[in-house]
């Protein structure tokens, strides 16, 4: 048969915790752990201190009190009152405060969540807090495991989001550097393009001039070829002409001599 929260508390009252070496009996034992103190369930501890059920015990103890219409004053003397001494509550409060003094991330990562839940459960069930806070803290305790999971998941989401933001920021910084590098290179490339355009224009002009000169050379070559062929063709006639020239020259010389001789012979009787 499943026990109710009321049964658990009654069992605590019927079976008090054996005294420890210190002058107090508590549902939790305080021990040293490296650089911090933690609360661990004492030997013979009842179900309200169990790490598996503390959030359920606190929640449903509050629920049962609410269903039975009991006030915080009535709870101080009924079967749901936790058999904890004031000094024990003080130690639990210290543990609770040590947890609250840490940030939530440290509490979760350092393994203090169970100590926190144990101490909060004891504080709730011991009726040592104002009645107007019982329901709120009970719900907080009941949902604490899932809240921690959501909290750590949200922290991871923030880390990933910030990582992406930083990555985008780095990309933007890199883009700015690329832009600053782009402008000088772009201007230089434009200047080179202008130089190339000017050189291409000059090249076009030179090519046109070369084509004109080439045409002139071809005309001269054709003329020279024609003249050369004419000279070659006229060479046989030139030999005959040279012979005729020599003969003609002899004739001319002979005639001129005769003419001069005639002039000389005729002069005396022409006086």
Image (tube, rainbow, N blue to C red):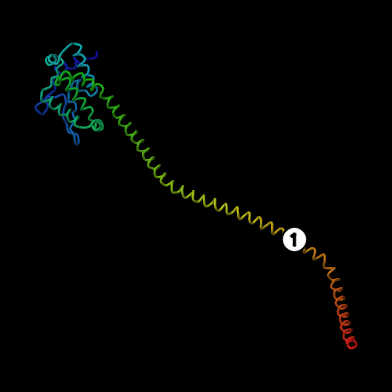
Which residue reaches farthest front? 271
The residue at the point 21 percent across, 25 percent down is 117
The residue at the point 63 percent across, 54 percent down is 208
Quadrant that contains the C terminus: bottom right
Which residue reaches farthest bottom? 268
Indicate the quadrant where residue 107 lies: top left
Q: Is residue 104 left or right of residue 185?
A: left
Quadrant that contains the N terminus: top left
Tell me residue 197's x, y (percent). 54, 50
Q: Is residue 60 left or right of residue 197?
A: left
Mark count: 1
- Which residue lies under the disc numbered 1? 223
Q: Secondary structure at mark 1?
A: helix
Q: Is residue 66 left or right of residue 232?
A: left
Indicate the quadrant where residue 50 lies: top left
Q: Please name whichever residue, 139 or 158, is drawn nearer the observer in this view of the structure.
A: 158
The residue at the point 63 percent across, 56 percent down is 209
Which residue reaches farthest left? 23
213 to 45, vertically: above or below: below
Q: Please name whichever residue, 7 or 171, is drawn nearer the observer in this view of the structure.
A: 171
């Amino acid at each position: 048969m499943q026990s109710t929260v009321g049964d658990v508390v009654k069992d605590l009252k019927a079976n008090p915790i054996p005294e420890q070496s210190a002058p107090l009996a508590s549902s939790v034992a305080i021990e040293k752990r490296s650089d911090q103190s933690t609360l661990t369930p004492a030997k013979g501890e009842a179900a309200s201190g169990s790490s598996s059920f503390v959030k359920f015990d606190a929640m449903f103890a509050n629920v049962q009190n609410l269903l039975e219409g009991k006030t915080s004053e009535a709870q101080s003397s009924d079967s749901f009152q936790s058999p904890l001494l004031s000094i024990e509550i003080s130690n639990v409060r210290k543990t609770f405060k040590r947890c609250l003094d840490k940030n939530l991330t440290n509490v979760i990562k350092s393994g203090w969540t169970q100590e926190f839940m144990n101490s909060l459960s004891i504080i709730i069930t011991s009726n040592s807090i104002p009645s107007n806070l019982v329901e709120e803290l009970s719900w907080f305790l009941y949902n604490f495991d899932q809240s921690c999971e959501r909290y750590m998941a949200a922290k991871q989401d923030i880390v990933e989001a910030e990582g992406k933001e930083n990555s985008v920021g780095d990309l933007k910084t890199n883009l700015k550097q690329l832009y600053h590098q782009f402008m000088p290179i772009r201007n230089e490339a434009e200047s080179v393009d202008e130089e190339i355009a000017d050189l291409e224009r000059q090249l076009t002009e030179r090519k046109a001039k070369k084509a004109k000169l080439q045409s002139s050379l071809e005309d001269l070559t054709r003329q020279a070829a024609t003249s050369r062929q004419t000279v070659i063709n006229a060479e046989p006639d030139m030999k005959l002409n040279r012979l005729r020239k020599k003969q003609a020259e002899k004739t001319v010389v002979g005639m001129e001599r005769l003419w001069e001789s005639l002039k000389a012979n005729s002069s005396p009787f022409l006086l």
